[in-house]
Image (spheres, grey):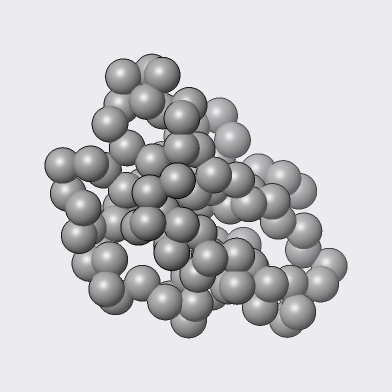
Amino acid sequence: MKSNLEELSEIVARANDLFYSKFNKIDTLMGIMDKNLRKQGIQADAITIDCVALDKKIVILLHDNKPDVVNITLGNKEGCIYSSEEYKLTEISETVILGIMEKNFI
């Protein structure tokens, strides 16, 4: 696993734990896609946070050609995208991810 992906996945995992400690009735699933996208020809890695009960998903993308940028997309399991925003990798923290989760899942 690439170092940016590993560091980001640790931040997301901690944010996910914080989210669950605040909202323990809302289950989320976190996933890491470090090979699947590449098999499809997409030069990127992704971290997903799914809230199955609400049919909502957060996808955090790290593109190879933009190593200092993170794209965060909000959508659903079918792949419909509601919004997408770019962040500098250095701006991403547990607080930022937790805020995105609260906004999208609450």
User: Looking at this view, is 32 or 79 the one in front?
Assistant: 32
- Tally of numbered discs: 0
Inspect this view and state whether residue 54 appears. Answer: no
Q: Residue at x 77, y 63 (%)?
A: 26
Answer left or right for 88 relative to 106.
left
Q: Quadrant of residue 16?
A: bottom right
Q: Residue at x 58, y 52 (%)?
A: 49
Q: Residue at x 38, y 18 (%)?
A: 40
Inspect this view and state whether residue 13 appears. Answer: yes
Answer left or right for 104 relative to 66.
right
For this orientation, the residue located farthest to the top is 40
Q: Position of residue 52 (x, y in %)?
A: 72, 45
The image shows residue 44, relative to residue 48, as above or below, that is above
User: Looking at this view, is 57 or 44 the one in front?
Assistant: 44
Q: Quadrant of residue 104?
A: bottom right
Q: Position of residue 74 (x, y in %)?
A: 45, 50
Q: Quadrant of the C terminus?
A: bottom right
The image shows residue 82, relative to residue 93, as above or below, that is above
Q: Position of residue 34 (x, y in %)?
A: 46, 37
For this orientation, the residue located farthest to the left is 65
Q: Position of residue 31 (x, y in %)?
A: 60, 45
User: Looking at this view, is 77 or 67 the one in front?
Assistant: 67
